[in-house]
Amino acid sequence: MPLRHDSADHATTDRTFQVDLRGLVDLLSHHLYSSPRVYLRELLQNAVDALTARHSLEPGAPADAFGIRLYADGSVVRVEDDGVGLTEADVHTFLATIGRSSKRAEQIADQRADFIGQFGIGLLSCFLVADEIHVVSRSARTPDAPAVEWRGRGDGSYAVRTLPASARPRSGTTVTLTPRADAGEWTRPAQVHALARHFGSLLRHPVTFDDGTGGQAAPVNPDPAPWARTHPTPGARSRALAAYGEEVFGFTPLDTIELDLPAVGLKGIACVLPEAIPAGRRHGHRVHVKGMLLSEQAEEILPDWAFFVRCVVDAESLRPTASRESLYEDDTLAAVRDALAERLRAWIARAAASDPELLGRFLQVHHLAVKSLAVHDDEIMRMLLPWLPFETTDGHATLDEFARTHRTVLVTSSVEEFRQVAAIASAAGLGVVNGGYTYDRELVHRLPEIRPEVSVADLDPATLTAHLDPVDRETELAAAAYLAQARDALAVFDCDVALRTFQPASAPALLLDSREARHERTRSQLAREQQGGVWGDILGALRQEAPRAQLILNQLNPLVRTAVTIGEPELARTSAEALYGQAAMLSRRPLRPAESSLINRSFLDLLAHALRKDS
């Protein structure tokens, strides 16, 4: 071992890393690659890169002059290419040194972007299915060089020898694997053919497969990518792309969007999903790099809001990660993501301008995705906000339809608030939009930007109460005693009680109680319970004047008219509690434990009273 003297008193010994190849293969299989099936992708990739290098040596050769041939008969898997090949020196340099890639050689460094792989560990993936890798290669760079054989074994040993020219008359490389018994799932002939189709269907070099039965070799990629084919009419092209999308993704697209970014050599299609998916759930996209399938779950190719499409693309300039199963996040990927997002915006704009039927079908399914986009994109907001559906007191309607009949639009802050007031507000002629769903409240408030004649305001209890008709003085005085007992009974819920008239008459009571008010009352209650402690001081500092809930009794309802005449104090309290409980349930908000207990108690008390009266 060489010694390096750093000082007169200290010496440092330079050592060489010892690599446990079996441990490294185990690391690859469990942490780098998602499945042993990637061995075939790595072999195809190496073959494609070798062909790319061969074409750089012979640029005048026809595109289909060199190809890749696969063979699998159950006992061996063989991949043969007509690529640039390796010399004996190349074998020692590149196959026997882990982490070194022939694609990094100085003579082709300036062509690095032409190659799929860049990490030099792909051949190790073959140890996921075999204990030995047998390589025979002959270099096209040195025509008189002999063929060379390399045998690498899973224990980390290898052997190299030269062979006579007759062992491989043509330039190129053959890799042969003898599968282990436990690798049959990935090395059976039918599986090898399926994997070749899966990974290499868009490769630009001809690839064939032979199952050893003596029949004619089957083409793996007989047709070019669908967007690279010519079609007699635009309609025929559109149908062909839709058929390809259905073949790849298993659904009939609502529409297909062609994607073409010449700056990065990207082509492909985006298929609009025919059904809605939950907000935030993102589908993966199929990304090919130079024809080789990189990933079926590449979420990073599109922004989060574009969850209404699934894409299949083939790109030249995107950079794969070390496992070559996802994309490296860099400036190029960010620019591609922005450019593809612009293509989707342009498709929406074209549909809005020239195909209202398509736009209507799209918005019916994917209005949530468009709302997400409209929140952050002023152009889309101005273009599509009038078309977007919302839940309103007039039913489900677009804002454009709703604004025609309501110049003042009120919007609730929660779904439960809308549920509380919808029937009464509709009867009172108020135009209320449910703003409790994601993005809705923010978008409704932007309506005046495109409809200046319309005003938008948040709905608060005072606004609704102002539209409820007061009862006459005589009726209010007659009900005063009952209202006082009702307020006392409901004081535990910080609830006031008032008597009004409103439609529909079938509604006995309306509970006005916002989520914010309930939270404030809960905080105030905690502050009272924690007086004197640090937590109590914090809550006290946050305390505001807690707004009270309001139980509005409907004088038009026969049950209420009877209730306000009750002279028996306990029965009056029980009826008020029952009316509160019924109104709370109709609001469809979660009931507090005390409210559930009140509903059960008031029901039983009323039942007991009825039974005593009848006996």
Image (spheres, grey):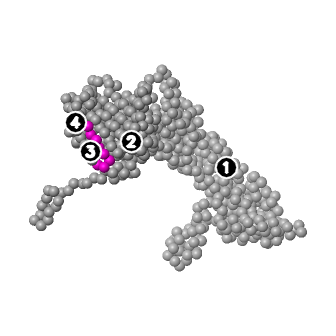
Q: Quadrant of the N terminus?
A: bottom left
Disc number at residue 430?
1
Q: Residue furthest bottom?
A: 532
Disc number at residue 286?
none
Q: CA distance from mark 2 to mark 1?
A: 75 Å
Residue 151 highlighted magenta (yes or no): yes
Q: Residue furthest top?
A: 232
Q: Are marks 1 and 3 in contact (CB under 8 Å)?
A: no
Q: Is residue 464 left or right of residue 165?
A: right
Q: CA distance from mark 4 to mark 1?
A: 91 Å
Disc 4 designates what residue? Answer: 162
Disc 2 designates what residue? Answer: 179
Secondary structure of the residue carrying tag 4 is strand
Q: Amino acid at mark 4?
A: Thr
Residue 87 vertical placement versus 127 (above, below): above
Q: CA distance from mark 2 to mark 4?
A: 25 Å
The stretch in magenta equals 149-156
Q: Who's the residue at 78% across and 67% down the image?
A: 604
N-terminal of the pair, mark 4 or mark 1, is 4
